[in-house]
C-alpha cells in the first residue's frame, strides 16, 4: 500500500515540476491573457465601427453616424442617418467602415460598390457634418482606418489576404507599407495603441490580432467564439471595445476587454504550484518517518 502511495506522490511531484517548468519557459498557456469584463446590448444601428475622443462615443453604420454619451450607449446625442453625401453616392460610394477620431474630426473609410477607389470621408465630431474627403487611395477595399498621432499618419489595410498595412500621410499619400509575418483574412476594424495595432477579424473565430508595427509580427491577442460577425474596435481608459454584429436582431453586442485583468496569471499559478510541491514533499517526508 505504501509503495502505491509513493508512486502516486512521485507522479504528482513530476506533474507539478513539469507545470512549473512550463511556466518558467514562457509556454503559451501561461502567457498573460486579456479578460472580457462585460458584454452589453447596444443599438442595432451601432453596427460597423466605433471611436471615442474621451468625451463621447461615435458609432458608424453602413450609411450613418451616431453620437452617444461617453458613459451611456443608450443616450443618443446626435445622429446623421444619411452621412454619405449625394455627390459621393453618385460616384458609387455606399459603405462606411470602422472609424477614427482625431483633432475633432471623424475619419471614416468609405468604399464604392466595385471596390476600386476607396477614400476617407471626414466629418465634424461635434455636428457630424461632412467636411470633405481624402483620396481616392491606392487600395481596393478599406474596412478601417486608425491614426498614429505621434507621426500623424493614417493606417489601413485590405479586407482579405491582408499581408501588409498601408501607411499614409494626412493628405493620403502612401508613404510606407508594414509587411506582416502572416496573412489575416476578413479584417473589419483596427486601432493603434503605441507601437501595437489591434485588428478585428471576422475569420470564423472572431479574432483580435495584435500587430507589432515595428517588426510586422502578428499574434493572436484574443478569440471571442461567437456565431456572429466581429466588426469595429475602439479604446478607452485601458480597455478595448469590440462590436459583435447580430444581423436581423434587435441589438448588437459590445464586448469590453480589460488589459489589466488577466484570465490566467502565471505568477499566481507558479506560487500555487510551489505551495503544492512543498505540500507533496511534506507528505512524502511524513510517510517516510513513519516507516
Image (tube, helix red, strand yellow):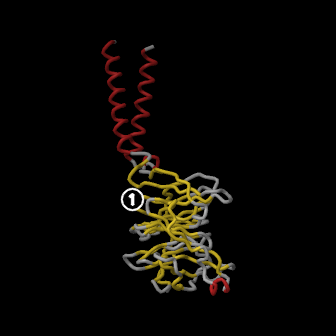
The x, y position of residue 70, in whole percent, is 44, 63
Q: Quadrant of the N terminus?
A: top left
Which residue is nearer to you in this view: 186 or 161?
Answer: 186
Tally of numbered tags: 1
Residue 267 located left or right of residue 62: left
Q: Quadrant of the C terminus?
A: top left
User: Which secondary structure, mark 1?
Assistant: loop
Which residue is nearer to you in this view: 20 or 124?
Answer: 124
Which residue is nearer to you in this view: 13 or 121?
Answer: 121
Occupied quadrant, residue 12: top left
237 lies above or below 107: above
The x, y position of residue 289, in whole percent, is 30, 15
The x, y position of residue 260, in whole percent, is 38, 53
Give the labeled residue for mark 1: 238
Q: In percent of the image, x 32 and y 24: which residue is there?
A: 282
The 10 Å Cα crowd at callout 1, few under 14, some 14 to 19, many 20 or more, is few
Which residue is nearer to you in this view: 260 or 91?
Answer: 91
Q: In percent of the image, x 64 and y 53: which residue is there?
A: 227
123 lies above or below 32: below
The x, y position of residue 64, in whole percent, is 59, 73
Amino acid at each position: 500500500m505504501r509503495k502505491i502511495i509513493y508512486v502516486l506522490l512521485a507522479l504528482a511531484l513530476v506533474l507539478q515540476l513539469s507545470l512549473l517548468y512550463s511556466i518558467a519557459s514562457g509556454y503559451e498557456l501561461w502567457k498573460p491573457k486579456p479578460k472580457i469584463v462585460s458584454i452589453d446590448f447596444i443599438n442595432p444601428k451601432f453596427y460597423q465601427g466605433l471611436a471615442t475622443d474621451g468625451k463621447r462615443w461615435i458609432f458608424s453604420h453602413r450609411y450613418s453616424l451616431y453620437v452617444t454619451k461617453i458613459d451611456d450607449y443608450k443616450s443618443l446625442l446626435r445622429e446623421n442617418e444619411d452621412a454619405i453625401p449625394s455627390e459621393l453616392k453618385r460616384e458609387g460610394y455606399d459603405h462606411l467602415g470602422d472609424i477614427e477620431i482625431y483633432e475633432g474630426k471623424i475619419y471614416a473609410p468609405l468604399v464604392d460598390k466595385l471596390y476600386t477607389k476607396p477614400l476617407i470621408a471626414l466629418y465634424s465630431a461635434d455636428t457630424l457634418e461632412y467636411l470633405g474627403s481624402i483620396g481616392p487611395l491606392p487600395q481596393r477595399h478599406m474596412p478601417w482606418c486608425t491614426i498614429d498621432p505621434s507621426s500623424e499618419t493614417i493606417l489601413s489595410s485590405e479586407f482579405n489576404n491582408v499581408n501588409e498595412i498601408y501607411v499614409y500621410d494626412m493628405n493620403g499619400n502612401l508613404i510606407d507599407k508594414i509587411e506582416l509575418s502572416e496573412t489575416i483574412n476578413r479584417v473589419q476594424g483596427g486601432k493603434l495603441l503605441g507601437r501595437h495595432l489591434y485588428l478585428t477579424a471576422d475569420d470564423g473565430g472572431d479574432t483580435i490580432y495584435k500587430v507589432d508595427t515595428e517588426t510586422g509580427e502578428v499574434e493572436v491577442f484574443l478569440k471571442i467564439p461567437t456565431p456572429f460577425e466581429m466588426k469595429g474596435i475602439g479604446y478607452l481608459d485601458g480597455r478595448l471595445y469590440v462590436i459583435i454584429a447580430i444581423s436581423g436582431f434587435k441589438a448588437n453586442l459590445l464586448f469590453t476587454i480589460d488589459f489589466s485583468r488577466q484570465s490566467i496569471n502565471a505568477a499566481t499559478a507558479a506560487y500555487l504550484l510551489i505551495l503544492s510541491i512543498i505540500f507533496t514533499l511534506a507528505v512524502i517526508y511524513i510517510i517516510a518517518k513513519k516507516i
